[in-house]
Amino acid sequence: MRLKGSYTVESAIVMGIVLTALCILIQTAFQWKNDTAGIMKLHETVEYKRYHRGSSSLSVPEYRIQVSESGNKVSGQYQGNKRTVQLEKGLYEPEEFIRMISLIVK
């Protein structure tokens, strides 16, 4: 025996599952986008700090980025929603590069 409206109930259940999955996928995509933008901003900030010597630390609060200089290294950290990325690079020293190139030229 079939009742009227049985297809409506079944399709409502299927649509509920589909819409829930779609919302989860969109939310995950936005989290990945935010993490990617934060990591790119971390790279940009570390590179800026390598070439502009001034204060010993720098922060970008909207992306939760901390960059500091110690010795000949510049290190930065990005604190994301579900991941933390650390980056460390040497200071920009053009005289070292010129010395290395002079060895190659000879």
Image (cartoon, helix red, strand yellow):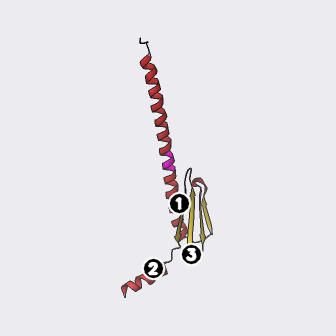
Q: Is the residue marked by circle 2 packed among few (<14), some (14-19), or many (20+) residues within 10 Å?
A: few
Q: Main secondary structure of the magenta part?
A: helix
Q: Marks 3 and 1: in contact by CB < 8 Å?
A: no
Q: Quarter of the image containing the C terminus?
A: bottom left
**Residue 97 bears which disc, if any?**
2
Check disc 1 and report the residue beneath it. Answer: 42
Q: Residue 38, how many percent across, how many down?
A: 52, 55
* Element assignment for label 1: helix
Q: Earlier in the sequence, mark 1 or mark 2?
A: 1
- Which numbered circle lies on residue 12? none
Give the quarter of the image for residue 85. bottom right
In the image, is residue 50 above or below residue 38?
below
Q: Which residues are magenta?
A: 30-34
Q: Quadrant of residue 68?
A: bottom right
Whichever of labels 3 and 2 marks the residue nearer the N terminus, that label is: 3
Residue 22 covered by magenta stretch? no
- Count of marks, rendered view: 3
Amino acid tagged 3 = Asn
Q: Residues within 10 Å of mark 3 (few under 14, many from 20)?
A: few
Q: Position of residue 6 (x, y in %)?
A: 44, 17
Relative placement, left or right, of 56 versus 13 is right
Which structural element holds mark 2? helix
**Residue plotted at (55% across, 54% down):** 83
Q: Which mark is residue 72?
A: 3
Q: Is residue 48 above or below residue 18?
A: below
Image quadrant in which the N terminus is located = top left
Q: Position of residue 14 (x, y in %)?
A: 44, 27
Spatial distance from mark 1 to mark 3, Cα to Cα?
18 Å
Q: Residue visible at 51% across and 52% down?
A: 35
Q: Amino acid at mark 1?
A: Leu
